[in-house]
Amino acid sequence: MELRFRFDYLEGRCGIAGITPGPGDGSTITMDQPCWRMARELYGPDLLALPSDVENSPDFLDRKGSWYLDRSRPGHHELLYRPRAGEDMRRAQVTAPVLETLVSGTGSPGRPVHDIAFKGLTFAHAGWTAPSEPAGFAAAWSMYLRPGRGDEIRLLTVPGNVAFRRAERITFQGNRFVHLGAQGLEFSKDSSHNTVDGNVFTDISDGGVVLGALPPETKGTDRGNRVTDNRVHRTGADYHASSGIWDAGSRETTIAHNQVDHVPYSGILSGPAEDVRGLMSGNRIVGNRVFATNRLLADGGGIYLRGEQGTSYADGAVVSGNVVSDSAYGEWNVGIYTDDSSKWITVRGNAVHSYRASIGGCSEDWGNRPVQNVRFHGNFWDDTVPDWLPRRSYPGGWPPAPDCGDPKNLEFRHNTLLTPDDPASDCAARPACAALVERAGPGESYRRGLGLK
């Protein structure tokens, strides 16, 4: 049995080591260690006082299609399952994942694995059992904690069931990544000039694609990768604080013409986990269609950027031609979210509407981490702001002190306000905005193969 904790952009779980009946009607619950110690450090004791769910017990098999793996007797595990209507377990075909890595390739410094293509394949039925360990899954985003030496706590990334490290010119084209227990596809540890094109990612426990300098790494050279014309939907099936596509730190990366939808947290995330500088430059997030994000967790967005994206506008991030919409869930999410210490970003020629806030972010003045040097040119948006947030004299949702502060050096030019009552119809009536909608997402030649027509 385990407890799950969900707070804004955080979600994790810890197992229960035992329950001891106490005097009267009370009982003492003993939690798994070291999970509970790490969760207290990450979430704080106040948040842990209110678990969101209790899961993973045979007593909860009340819904048809639910199952439980009983491992209480070593060497004799038993799978309990409540059949769906019409299922005959004497004839049922059952697939139980054994592998955690389906395909992997790892080069060495100066000798990358290179020039391999995977086309038209299905990568399916891989698991990932680390959250079942006593260290559990004290987690935020696609990262979780593990004890290191002494009192050290290490921050790790949920791995890819298909993973390449120190890899160059690896191509994944026209494949399906389905029924996977970790991340779908990973490129990391100095992987450059790789291509992820025209693939489907769905029914995955964590995110679809992750690349760049992944925690615990704080440096690396990951350059010139392309994630284009893919469909990423209904990911984050188990680990909800995940993003459909995450670039954790790279250069000259292109994330273009993907469709990301129906995800529990953010659609496309660009930026390192910590305030690591010098990792990112020259990245392009262009022509993507993003909707139905943040369906479970708040404080994320359709396209979420954080951290230093370059050293000037010339080599900073460009977010252009994207259509981001229809995700007004919860109390707080942002269509194009420039958060934390975001800087050197150009947000140009996008259509954004029907989020709690169209644009904005928390400028972290504490620790000299303000949002700064972000320009918004030629966008269409409804400029929504939630009722609890005071409106600034300039567009967007920018929470004030004490938690956040004033962003610096924002630039607004030639943006068009869509009517908040029906922004989609207003966009459709404006030729330039309607053209953005027509062009965003996977190209015409990809759509049938992705199940979009």
Image (spheres, rainbow, N blue to C red):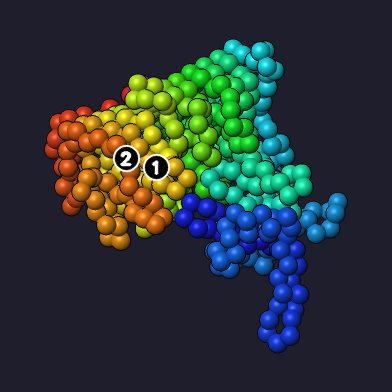
Q: Residues within 10 Å of mark 1 (few under 14, many from 20)?
A: many
Q: Amino acid at mark 1?
A: Pro
Q: Position of residue 203 (x, y in %)?
A: 53, 42
Q: Position of residue 129 (x, y in %)?
A: 70, 45
Residue that protrudes farthest toward the right in the picture: 75
Secondary-structure class at tag 1: loop
In which image quadrant can residue 4 be found? bottom right
Residue 140 locus on image (x, y percent): 55, 48
Callout 2, which amino acid? Answer: Lys
Left or right: residue 112 compared with residue 407: right
- What residue would you read off at disc 2? 408
- Vertical position of residue 268 compared to residue 62: above or below: above
Q: Is residue 142 visible?
A: yes
- Identity of the residue drawn at 59% across and 49% down: 139
In front: 51, or 54?
51
The residue singled out by tag 1 in the image is: 370
Q: Residues within 10 Å of mark 2 (few under 14, many from 20)?
A: some
The answer to which quarter of the image holds residue 284 is top left
Q: Is residue 205 above or below residue 282?
A: below
Quadrant position of the N terminus in the picture: bottom right
First-in-chain label (2 vs 1): 1
Answer yes or no: do the residues labelled 2 and 1 have beta carbons within 8 Å?
yes
x 50%, y 58%: residue: 7
